[in-house]
Amino acid sequence: MTEICIDQLRASLEGVVAAVMATSDADGVPNVSMISQVHYVDTERVALSYQFFNKTRRNLLETRRATVQITDPQTCQHHRLELDYLETLTAGPLFERMKAQLAGIASHHGMENVFRLLGADVFRIVSIEPVPGLPSATRPAPRPLLAAARRSCAALDGCCDLEELLDTVMASLEHDFGIRHSILLLVEDGEERLYAVASRGYPTSGAGAEVAFGEGVIGVAAREAVPIRIGHMTREYRYGAAVGDMARRAGLMPETQRIIPFPGLTAPRSQIALPVMVSGKVLGVLFGESEEMMCFSYDEEDALALVASHLGARMALLRQEPPEEDATAPLPPVPRERAVRVRHYPFDQSVFLDNDYLIKGVAGAILWRLLCLHEETGRTDFSLRELRVDPALRLPTHAENLDARLILLRRRLEERKACIRLERSGRGRVGLIVPRGLTLEDAGAVDPA
Amino acid sequence: MRILLGRAGNVALLEAVGAGAGLAVTFTAAPDHRSFQVKTSHAEIRPATSDDLPEMDRQTACFMDDLLELGFPPELARGYVAFDPADLIAIEFLPDRVFTQTPGPGAGAELKR
């Protein structure tokens, strides 16, 4: 291995200053071109974006050798990398990471329709050589990211339940990393879709908002189980389109659109999405964004990946069935003058309060079940255990996200200022607060298709 | 064509040209990526002179303006165009072939004389 390690040069691999690539054909005729992206793979490899089939490409396939000059955007120090071509990847995590970044770079340079990633050319680094030049600006002291990650992890260790954990991770992102806008999404059991369960720094919580796998940096991070970040925002990675399409395909009428808007910034410039994994499975995505360009570097990604990983481990621990507390006294009903009709559509488990869409899916099914049980028995206090095994709910055997659904449901009810409320009535229990004069109406097993 | 470059940072290149190697040079406009590449089979190494400096200053000033317009911070733009006059050396050649290199369809096409 060379004396200089590519790990120390990752600031030069952010695509701020275009890199220069030199190749030659078999006869030794040189070719030199600008290249948008030199991507860090690991301590021994980098990947270059393959966008066009051109002379560079032909030379590469012929000689399998290249030299690339990279530039640190803060110190202007150049380095030359001597590279050996290994392979071209056209799918998978590395490809998707580069594709997202390239889309941001392209958008920033007004080349959205020109720069397209055809492949990630992976190279072995043969040598790294600093290019002598004029001493330039010194690098400003970086934010101490290890300390930030350690503080965040310690804060997560102090949390006793899922809701506290979710709120704490977002507070930590703000206090320890300066990320003021963040969302935590969880994967819908057995589906290629995520729903927002907590957020910070937006006018609305967006609890329940959905993101499809593959959509935006969040959806790609979930599908590929790899962190995705963008330093310049691009239309290609915006949210809303795919979920809107799903709704249209489901044949929903516009006036009853069962969609909770994504809470994100309208003009983000930097975004990062980190998969939250447990035992190799993506549980959710931790997402942060900013209106500033190039907010998240390789180092920030590493530090945040540690926090996301710790979050996953803590979530897994908290999922183990908590000891149940005894039922509390029935909660008093909320006085209300006007009758409210709750309507339930079994085909998508959506629940409407009068004519206003509230929630759908598993969270909708749970709310409807609680309301029915309340109507039949007058009970206002329920244990999570009974919901987990309730045959009427038919939750998946390992309904891992029941806690999360209840958090989402409670926040959604609060946000809609609904007459129904959910409260934590003790460990492993949930309390239902309903007004008098609630009428339940089941729209029957109507298939809209 | 007369290309000015730093000696210290281009030792291998200067050795190769001195030994008779071919040369490729790509020119890119920072704002819109319009680019072209020239190639030659033979080039000469010449000393840089004080007569080169006014044109160096003019071109680096223009390049720096482009970088600032693109949103580069001034200290980065300054660092990117900085050079040491004492380190300069020149390469002279007649281009054999010229290619367009602006990204997109048509990149790499040879410009006929």
Image: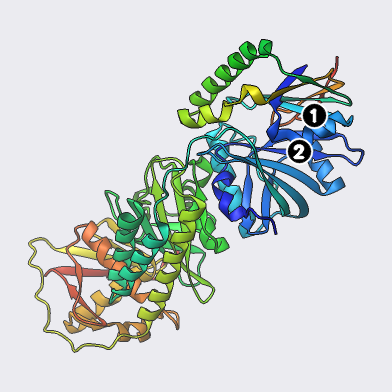
Q: Is residue A33 above or below residue A257?
A: above
* Residue B40 rendering spot, x and y as whole percentages: 86, 24
Instruction: Name the residue rendered at 63%, 14% in the picture.
Output: B53
Residue closest to the eye, A423 or B82:
B82
Q: Secondary structure at mark 2?
A: strand
How many numbered discs, if any? 2
| Residue at mark 2 | A22
* Residue A24 rendering spot, x and y as whole percentages: 84, 39
Q: What is the three-letter code of the residue carrying label 1?
A: Ala
Instruction: Name the residue rendered at 37%, 57% in the picture.
Output: A183
Residue A218 seen anywhere in this rendered image of the structure? no
Residue closest to the eye, A367 or A426:
A426
Instruction: Name the residue rendered at 32%, 73% in the picture.
Output: A162
* Chain containing the residue with disc 1: B
C-alpha gap between disc 1 and disc 2? 9 Å
Residue density around tag 1, few if under 14, some if 14–19, many if 20 or more, within 10 Å? many
Residue density around tag 2, few if under 14, some if 14–19, many if 20 or more, within 10 Å? many
* Chain containing the residue with disc 2: A
Disc 1 + disc 2, Cβ < 8 Å: yes
Q: Quadrant of residue A390?
A: bottom left
Question: Do the dots labelled 1 and 2 sit on one chain?
Answer: no
Q: Which residue reaches farthest right?
A: A27
Instruction: Name the residue rendered at 87%, 46% in the picture.
Output: A62
Q: Which mark is residue A360?
A: none
Q: What is the three-letter code of the residue carrying label 2?
A: Ala
